[in-house]
Amino acid sequence: MINDNTMTHGKNICNQLKEVRKCIAEENDIPLEIEECSYKGECRGTCPRCLKSEK
């Protein structure tokens, strides 16, 4: 079962991690394209789609 609090908390973590990646990329002149997450399911902030983008 999907819990709205878990999803909201997870999305907040996800957004913070995206912001960190963006800052690191900018500081190091690394091109980075961040797509909007459309993951459907219980999000803990590190969903499979987000983990894939780290690599």
Image (cartoon, grey):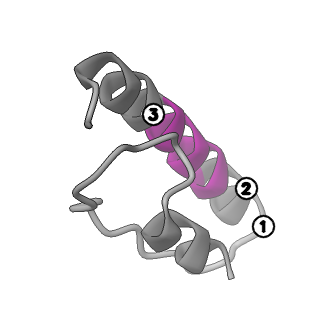
Up/down of 38 relative to 14, above or below: below
Q: Which-is-in-front pick, marks 2 and 3?
A: 3
Helix, strand or loop at label 3? It is: helix
Q: Main secondary structure of the magenta part?
A: helix
Q: Residue at x 35, y 44 (%)?
A: 42
Quadrant assignment, res 19: top right
Q: Residue at x 50, y 70 (%)?
A: 48
Helix, strand or loop at label 1? It is: loop
Q: Are marks 2 and 1 in contact (CB under 8 Å)?
A: yes
Q: Which residue is mark 3?
A: 10
Q: Which residue is mark 2?
A: 24
> Measured from the top left, where is residue 40 in percent x and y?
22, 57
Up/down of 25 relative to 8, above or below: below
Q: Residue at x 51, y 40 (%)?
A: 44
Q: Which residue is mark 1?
A: 28
Drawn side of residue 37 relative to residue 6, left or right: left
Q: Amino acid at mark 1?
A: Asn
Tell me the crowding category of disc 1: few under 14, some 14 to 19, or many 20 or more residues within 10 angstroms, Cα based. Answer: few
Quadrant assignment, res 33: bottom left
Q: Are marks 3 and 1 in contact (CB under 8 Å)?
A: no
Q: Amino acid at mark 2?
A: Ile
Up/down of 20 relative to 8, above or below: below
Q: Residue 44 shows which numbered tag?
A: none
Depth check, front residue: 29 or 46: 46
Cα separation between marks 2 and 3: 21 Å
Q: Farthest residue in the right direction? A: 28
Q: In the image, which residues are magenta? A: 13-22
